[in-house]
Image (tube, grey):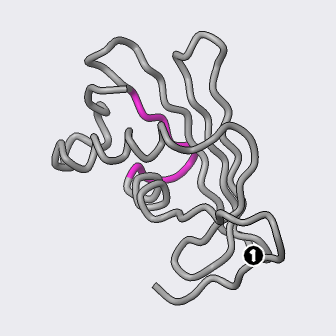
Amino acid sequence: MSGSVTKATRELPPFDLRQFERVLAQMPDGYTEGCFRGRLWGATVKRSADGKRLWLYGEELGATDIVSFNLYFLSDEKTVLKPCEMSSAKVLDFVLGFSPMQQAGPKSICGPD
């Protein structure tokens, strides 16, 4: 998943883009709960069978905030981020700040940032 995210995120330093891609690569397919900014969120990741598209939908549990985007892998050097009705900055902030819960037992309470 190396390359650059085009257009809306080109003002970000390349380090942030590489980190964004690394974090996404580590997120498992399917539904995961975790913490973001001290609040409990649920996130679903789906990858296309051909590996050319990743979709993420996240929502703050018990509230109304959401994050949603498609990421297209056009080539080894070109990746296109398409946020759904929100800024690219919000998407990057969520992906870089989301911490999946590691345990399957009772839900942990998310601490402050």
Residue in the picture at 68% in, 32% down: 46
Residue in the picture at 65% in, 68% down: 65
Q: Is residue 112 above or below residue 31?
A: below
Q: Position of residue 97 (x, y in %)?
A: 45, 65
Q: Is residue 83 above or below residue 54?
A: below
Q: Position of residue 42 (x, y in %)?
A: 72, 60
Q: Is residue 103 left or right of residue 98?
A: right
Residue in the picture at 59% in, 55% down: 67
Secondary structure of residue under mark 1: loop
Badge 1 local density, few (<14 within 10 Å), some, or many (20+)? Answer: few
Q: Is residue 9 above or below residue 1?
A: below
29 or 93, which is in the foreground?
29
Magenta region includes residue 81 = yes
Give the residue at the far bottom of this rendering.
Answer: 112
75 or 102, which is in the foreground?
102
The image quadrant of residue 22 is top left
Where's the N terminus, which quadrant?
A: top left
Residue in the picture at 63% in, 41% down: 28
Q: Is residue 84 left or right of residue 80?
A: right
25 or 43, which is in the foreground?
25
Say which amino acid is labelled 1: Ala
Q: Position of residue 81 (x, y in %)?
A: 43, 34
Residue indicated by mark 1: 63
Q: Is residue 58 above or below residue 82?
A: below
Q: Is residue 65 left or right of residue 112?
A: right
95 or 11, which is in the foreground?
95
Q: What's the magenta region?
A: 80-88
Q: Is residue 95 left or right of residue 69?
A: left
Magenta region includes residue 99 = no
The image quadrant of residue 32 is bottom right
